[in-house]
Structure formats: structure tokens, C-alpha cells
């Protein structure tokens, strides 16, 4: 799709590099993959977590990335540089095609909150985790703790309507620590949750908004409407978040709840 004026510099914008990679570093540090781990990366996206875990588990380990999107699985496979052998499987997180106790480590970065049946996903995590294994889950906390997504929600609502704005709020749909703990505790005996602050460096607020527009589904806002209103959306985001940009990129915080289960 043509995303409108100023789009020439935006194709290089990467949510993986700017937003997800800094957060996944925290997830991996908490999960502590080690030599020989068999790792399942649920909602693996482009495979950042799988790649990091595959590097730490080494050639004696094994990594499997699961996602519902064939395009992201192909991307993950093409970008994988871990030392462990890796496989990429298209599957629903709530109905995993693996034997019981198949993995010593299960990762899920920003996937659980999107599940239609979260309890079923957690039960599947428990089923495929080996005795003595562990599970690490990260979900964004409240959108109020994330000024650039909060601004984006309001700007999208004004220019494109509530369906488009809901795309900005969806990642924050499991924000409460107690809710996450209760969900996980139904299947795991030990659940430890840490509140983590992630600092992200975006080229600019406008670049973030322009890139986000490409991921809004047609049903939420038609491509032609997004293209027509992009310049106004980008300009308003730059005005609103200018204070976060001081002679350089927009350095913006985001807060997540990071759970480790056994």
C-alpha cells in the first residue's frame, strides 16, 4: 500500500528493532536459556526470542517457533542465526501439535493477551513443558504507562475512528498483574511476576505512527483512507510527542509484566 507523503524513509522502520528486541532482552534474561534447552517460542513473530534462545541453548539444544502467520514464520526462518537446530510451525497456541512435556523452556512475548481463550493457551503451555522446565511470559501493562501508544490511540480515534484506535489498545488488553498471575497460577504451581520498564528509541513519533498505519487491518480502516489521512496523523503525533525528542530519536518508555512459571 502507498502510505502517503513522507513514506520514502519509513520502510526502514522496524518494530522488531525499535520495540520488540529491547523487550525480548528482558524476557530472555528472566528465562535464562542454557545449553541443551529445548525451546518453544509461542507467537514467535519474526523469531527474535527464538534466535536469542537458540544461541544460548547451542547445538545441543532445539528451538521451535510457533505462529499463526505464514509470512512471519518465513521471515523468522530466514533471519534465524541461533546455533540450535530450529523448526517453524504454523499452529494455534490453544491447540499445540506437540507431545506432552516436549520442551524445557516455553517463551511467549506479547502473545497471550491476543488469545481468544487465554486459559486454553496457558493449559497448553503447561502440558508441553517438561518436568522441571519453566515458562516465561511478557505482556504490556497499562496503555497509560506508554505515552506514545496513548497518543497514537487518541490520534487514530480522531482521524480514523474507534476501530482503528482499538488496534493501538489491543496490545494492552491484559494489563493487570493480578489477572496475569491468576491466569498462570491455574496451571503452574510457582508464578513470579516482575514489572519491567523498557526504553525504546524511535526515529520520531511520526515515523512510529506512519509505520503503525501499515498494520491496521482493512476492516478497521481502508487503505485509501489511511493514505489520505497519514500526513495529518504523522504531523499530529510529532506535535504531541515533540517533548520526547531532544535532538535525536524519540526515547519513550513502555511497561510490561514479566512472568516466570514453574
Image (spheres, rainbow, N blue to C red):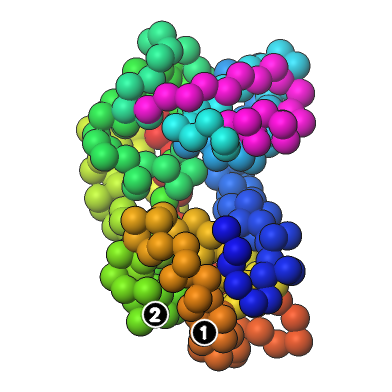
- Along the line of sight, which residue is nearer the eye, 194 or 6? 6
Q: Is residue 43 left or right of residue 161?
A: right
Instruction: Please give the residue where the numbered disc 2 appears in the rendered image.
Output: 159
Name the mark on residue 44. none
Q: Quadrant of the N terminus?
A: bottom right
Would residue 8 be seen by someone viewing this image from the given angle? yes
Residue 24 locus on image (x, y percent): 59, 47
Mark 2, Cα crowd under 10 Å, few <14 / some 14-19 / many 20+, is some
Residue 234 locus on image (x, y percent): 56, 80
Would residue 148 be seen by someone viewing this image from the given angle? no
Residue 88 sits inside the magenta stretch: yes
- Along the line of sight, which residue is nearer the eye, 130 or 138? 138
Contact (Cβ within 8 Å) of mark 1 with mark 2: yes
Q: Is residue 208 left or right of residue 158?
A: right
Secondary structure beneath label 1: helix
Tell me which corner region of the image, top left, top right, bottom left or bottom right, holds residue 100: top left
Q: Is residue 230 left or right of residue 92?
A: right
The relative height of residue 196 versus residue 63 in the rendered view (above or below) is below
Instruction: Please give the residue where the numbered disc 1 appears in the rendered image.
Output: 232
Which residue lies at the image location 67% right of the left edge and 70% below the top edge? 7
Which residue lies at the image location 75% right of the left edge and 16% below the top edge? 59
Count of labels in the image: 2
Tell me which corner region of the image, top left, top right, bottom left or bottom right, holds residue 132: top left
Q: CA distance from mark 1 to mark 2?
A: 8 Å
Mark 1, Cα crowd under 10 Å, few <14 / some 14-19 / many 20+, is some
The relative height of residue 15 versus residue 31 in the rendered view (above or below) is below
Magenta range is 73-92
Amino acid at each position: 500500500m502507498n502510505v502517503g507523503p513522507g513514506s520514502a524513509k519509513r520502510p526502514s522502520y522496524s518494530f522488531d528493532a525499535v520495540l520488540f528486541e529491547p523487550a525480548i532482552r528482558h524476557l530472555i534474561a528472566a528465562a535464562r536459556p542454557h545449553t541443551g534447552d529445548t525451546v518453544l517460542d509461542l507467537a514467535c513473530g519474526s523469531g527474535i526470542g527464538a534466535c536469542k534462545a537458540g544461541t544460548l541453548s547451542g547445538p545441543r539444544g532445539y528451538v521451535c517457533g510457533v505462529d499463526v502467520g505464514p509470512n512471519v514464520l518465513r521471515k523468522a526462518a530466514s533471519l534465524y542465526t541461533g546455533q540450535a537446530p530450529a523448526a517453524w510451525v504454523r499452529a494455534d497456541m490453544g491447540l499445540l501439535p506437540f507431545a506432552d512435556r516436549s520442551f524445557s523452556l516455553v517463551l511467549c512475548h506479547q502473545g497471550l493477551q491476543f488469545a481468544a481463550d487465554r486459559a486454553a493457551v496457558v493449559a497448553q503451555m503447561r502440558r508441553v513443558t517438561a518436568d522441571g522446565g519453566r515458562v516465561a511470559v511478557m505482556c504490556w501493562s497499562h496503555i497509560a504507562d506508554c505515552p506514545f501508544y496513548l497518543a497514537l490511540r487518541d490520534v487514530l480515534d480522531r482521524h480514523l475512528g474507534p476501530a482503528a484506535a482499538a488496534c493501538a489498545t489491543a496490545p494492552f488488553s491484559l494489563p493487570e498483574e493480578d489477572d496475569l498471575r491468576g491466569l498462570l497460577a491455574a496451571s503452574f504451581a510457582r508464578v513470579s511476576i516482575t514489572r519491567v520498564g523498557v526504553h525504546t528509541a524511535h526515529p520520531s513519533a511520526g515515523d512510529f505512527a506512519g509505520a503503525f498505519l501499515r498494520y491496521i487491518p482493512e476492516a478497521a480502516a481502508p487503505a485509501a483512507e489511511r493514505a489520505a489521512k497519514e500526513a495529518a496523523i504523522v504531523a499530529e503525533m510529532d506535535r504531541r510527542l515533540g517533548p520526547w525528542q531532544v535532538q535525536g530519536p524519540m526515547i519513550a518508555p513502555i511497561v510490561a509484566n514479566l512472568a516466570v512459571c514453574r
